Image: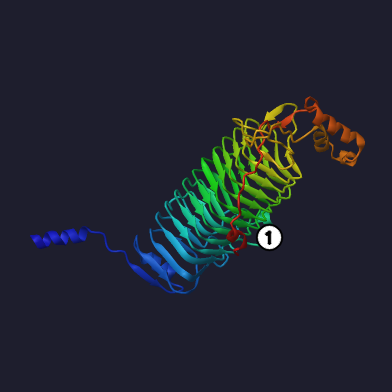
Amino acid sequence: MMLLRALLILLALPAAAAEWDVAPGALSETLARAEAGDTLLLRPGTYRETVAVDRAVTIEGGGKAVIDGGGKGTVITVTAPDVTLSGLTVIGSGASHETLDSGIKLTKGATGAVVRGNVLKGNLHGVDVHGARDALVAGNLIEGRQDRHMNARGNGVYVWNAPGAVVERNDIRWGRDGIFVNTSKRNIFRDNRFRELRFAVHYMYANFSEVTGNLSIGNDLGYAVMFSRRVKVADNISIGDREHGVMLNYANDGIVTGNLVRGVKDRCAFLYNANKNTFSGNRFEGCEIGIHFTAGSEGNTITGNAFIGNRTQVKYVSTRWVEWSDEGRGNYWSDFAAYDVNGDGIADTPYRPNDSMDHVLWTQPSAKLLLGSPAVQLVRWSQSAFPALLPGGVVDSHALMRPVEIPVPEWEMNHD
């Protein structure tokens, strides 16, 4: 009786997870024989096949296994929960945007999938998180295609309807957008590096999410948040991007804090119909325009930021005044010859970045020919002497005497 009971207990226990030694050419065959919880250890070499992962296994490439899809469809498709893919080099996806051909695709059934420490090169999309909840994409090198116009390429990581997805510590280059998220929520994108892309991070209809600690270098645009609510954009860096460092377009109730934008050829920050956002502790430096806001972008709190060496600090056309300080604390302006008699760190006079000539120049660019004329200088002098003559716009009643400092870690700039 005791022997029978022990036998029944042993039969009820789950079988120990197996490890499979997989040679090139045998990956799909071995996967069909594996059980949930097993680990497939790939030998060095090239596996010329597309792979469908339909059970909860770990596939480990050890950094020397190459999976080549041969230019057709998606290379690895995951449909089961709790799958881990690591140490793989994935190449050779198809080129169809209609089917979102990718190096790795995580479908709706791939809850909790982990894609870690892989190299994905030359695929249309690198990783497509397509409906998989709570997925993790971490520590991968993703290099997109370069053989077509940028807008015709795919994204490094595409996140669609994938609540809880985390994308972190990836190095993403070429392709179209570094991370493109559409119709999702509660996503975290942190500590990634983006180079030579259209957008580093591109939000569309994605709420309650965060973009933190990322580095964007030499892209068309750094961090674009569109048609989204309650997105936190914090502690990111944009260096030498071409159009905008941070853009909010129909983005509301967000937080933009602790970001460094430097050397952008157009605007450090651009707000278009973006309302009830908080901008604090950012450093906007060396751009053509420090911050441009338009199309009803009002009701935002803008305090504790530094505007340094921008050709135009603020571009805003309005007939009424908008206050850019909060609870007695404004922003730092490098072109403001301020004084602080009582030494409290707050300028003793208000700062107004624009005058009526700025408004004329923005609406009538040909008027730039008159900039050096005595009449223009007289108008500007009279407005500085008599602020009541100013047409409306931004006023900072409590400008700061010192700027916020945001260092750029040297390893982030020099690491290839």
Q: Is residue 263 above or below residue 208?
A: below
Q: Position of residue 406 (x, y in %)?
A: 61, 49
Indicate left or right for 156 with 221 as reference: left
Amino acid at the residue labelled 1: Arg
Q: Is residue 359 visible?
A: yes
**Residue at the spot 73% in from the left edge and 50% down from the top edge:** 265
Above or below, 263 relative to 74: above
Of residues 230 and 33, the one drawn nearer to the viewer in this rendering: 230
> How many marks overall?
1
Residue located 62% across and 63% down the image: 414
The residue positioned 73% from the left and 26% from the top of the image is 320
- As helix, strand or loop, the secondary structure at mark 1 comes to loop
Question: Going by the picture, which residue comes out furthest to the left?
Answer: 1
Splitting the image into 4 quarters, where does residue 255 fall?
top right
* 349 on left or right of 11: right
The residue lying toward the viewer, choosing from 354 and 56, is: 354
Mark 1, residue position: 148
User: The N terminus lies in which quarter of the figure?
Assistant: bottom left
Name above or below for residue 392 compared with residue 311: above
Tell me residue 161's x, y (percent): 50, 45
The image quadrant of residue 365 is top right
The residue positioned farthest toward the front in the image shown: 342
Q: Tell me: 6 left or right of 142.
A: left
Whether residue 199 is visible: no
Task: Tell me where residue 416 sits by quadrant.
Answer: bottom right
Query: Which residue sits furthest top?
Result: 388
> Residue 293: image x %, image y %?
69, 37
Q: Give the colour scheme of this rendering.
A: rainbow
The spot of residue 11 in percent (x, y) is: 20, 60
Return the residue nearer the eye: 59 or 193. 193
